[in-house]
Image: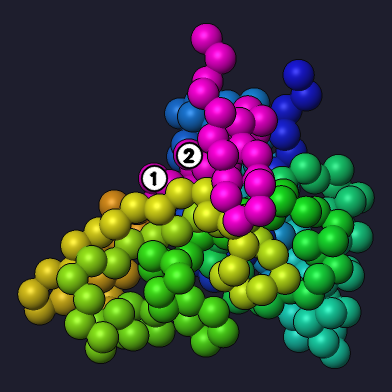
Amino acid sequence: MKKTRIAVLVSGGGTNLQALINAQQRGEIINGEIAAVISSKEDAYALERAAKAGIPGFVIPRKAYASNREMTVAVVEKLRELDIDLIVLAGCMVIFTNEMTDAYPNAIINVHPALIPSFCGKGYYGLHVHEAALAYGVKVSGATVHFVSEECDGGPIIAQKSVPVLEGDTPETLQQRIMEQAEWILLPEAVSLFCQGRLSVEGRTVHIKEARN
């Protein structure tokens, strides 16, 4: 069985990319390999993480294109050139247009730092998500891994994990706890399930097949 070729799309520090690299090095991404890291910014630290792990890094800068659509077309061309099977959005701060979802239906995975459908959609990214959760007074938050559709944060949900909100939390402390207790665990697990062919989508529901012994 051919290994699934994964491209991780990034814009910044690459903590979720590091979680994927660590999982790959531990042999936890079954039947998959990170074949490329593509950054929307030249100075993203994620590119250094990729280089240290011996993973080819590419820069397709958002500022070089007049619109998200033009950039999306360029990224899709690169993905096809690299023979990519699965795209993982790991802190990528670009809203890609339908050219990507049309080219890779149910083959783009995103991680969002809240329990969708709460605190998601346009404007909810990075610390903004945790600021909104704390302002609302929720007692639990968490992370969601989902397939990407044309609707921002609106694709079928693969996995979710709740994380407690503690007295005195700041957006920064809540962000760190959700990364450590949810995002860095769920994302590699979901990627491995995809690479094993164990995910199927029916409407809004993602079914997870039992592992074959």
Q: Of the numbered discs in the image, which one, if any, rests on residue 29?
A: none
Does the CB distance between marks 2 and 1 fall below 8 Å?
yes
Quadrant including the N terminus: top right
Spatial CA distance of label 2 from label 1 is: 7 Å
Q: Of the numbered discs in the image, which one, if any, rests on residue 189?
A: 2
SS at mark 2 in the image: helix
Decide which of 85, 7 is in the foreground and name it: 85
SS at mark 1 in the image: helix
* Residue 82 percent across, percent down from the top left: 85, 47
* Residue 113 percent across, percent down from the top left: 41, 67
* Residue 150 percent across, percent down from the top left: 72, 71
Q: Amino acid at mark 2?
A: Glu
The residue most toward the left is 167
| Residue 173 visible, this angle | no
Q: Amino acid at mark 1?
A: Ile
Q: Which residues are magenta?
A: 184-213
Q: How many marks?
A: 2
Q: Name the residue located 20 percent from the left edge and 82 percent from the top edge.
A: 137
**On screen, 27 above or below 207?**
above
Q: Is residue 124 left or right of residue 203?
A: left
Which residue is denoted by mark 1 in the rendering?
185
The residue most toward the top is 213
**On screen, 109 above or below 123?**
above
| Residue 29 visible, this angle | yes
Q: Is residue 45 left or right of residue 126?
A: right
- Count residues near mark 2 (Cα–Cα under 10 Å), then give few for <14, some for 14-19, many for 20+: many
Quadrant position of residue 138: bottom left
* Residue 140 percent across, percent down from the top left: 23, 66
**On screen, 210 above or below 104?**
above
Decide which of 91, 46 is in the foreground and name it: 91
Quadrant position of residue 76: bottom right
